[in-house]
Image (cartoon, grey):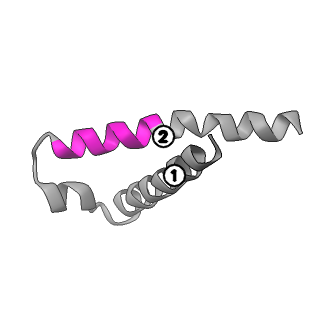
Amino acid sequence: METLQKICLVITIIGAIVWGVIGFFSYNIVEALFGNTIIPRIIYSIVGITGLINIGILFNHIED
């Protein structure tokens, strides 16, 4: 489970960087790379799911 959380954390951090670029520069890297297709929606969904999985990290620190 620890490996899965680390992978999810990396994906979530990359997603946060993408959202930061959108916020600061109004430039969507994902849509620039993949166009206006279904792929950006899939990528954003994966980032959202990994964010939910990372909630487990929060609860692990509370239990310690």
Residue 52 appears at what percent x and percent y?
53, 33
Seen as rendered, the residue at the extreme left is 36
Q: Quadrant of residue 57?
A: top right
CA neighbours of label 1 inside 10 A, class few (<14), some (14 to 19), many (20+): few
Residue 20 versus residue 43: which sits nearer the camera?
A: 43
Q: Which residue is mark 2?
A: 50
In reply to whether residue 55 is colored magenta, the answer given is no
Residue at 59 percent across and 49 percent down: it is 3
Residue type of the residue flagged with mark 2: Thr
Q: Is residue 43 left or right of residue 50?
A: left
Q: Which residue is mark 1?
A: 7
Of the two numbered discs 2 and 1 on the same chain, state the one appearing first in sequence.
1
Quarter of the C terminus within the rendering: top right
Tell me, for residue 54, which label it has, or none.
none
Residue type of the residue flagged with mark 1: Ile
- Separation of marks 2 and 1 at Cα, in angstroms: 8 Å
CA neighbours of label 2 inside 10 A, class few (<14), some (14 to 19), many (20+): many
Magenta part of the protein: which range?
39-49
Residue at 59 percent across and 45 percent down: it is 5
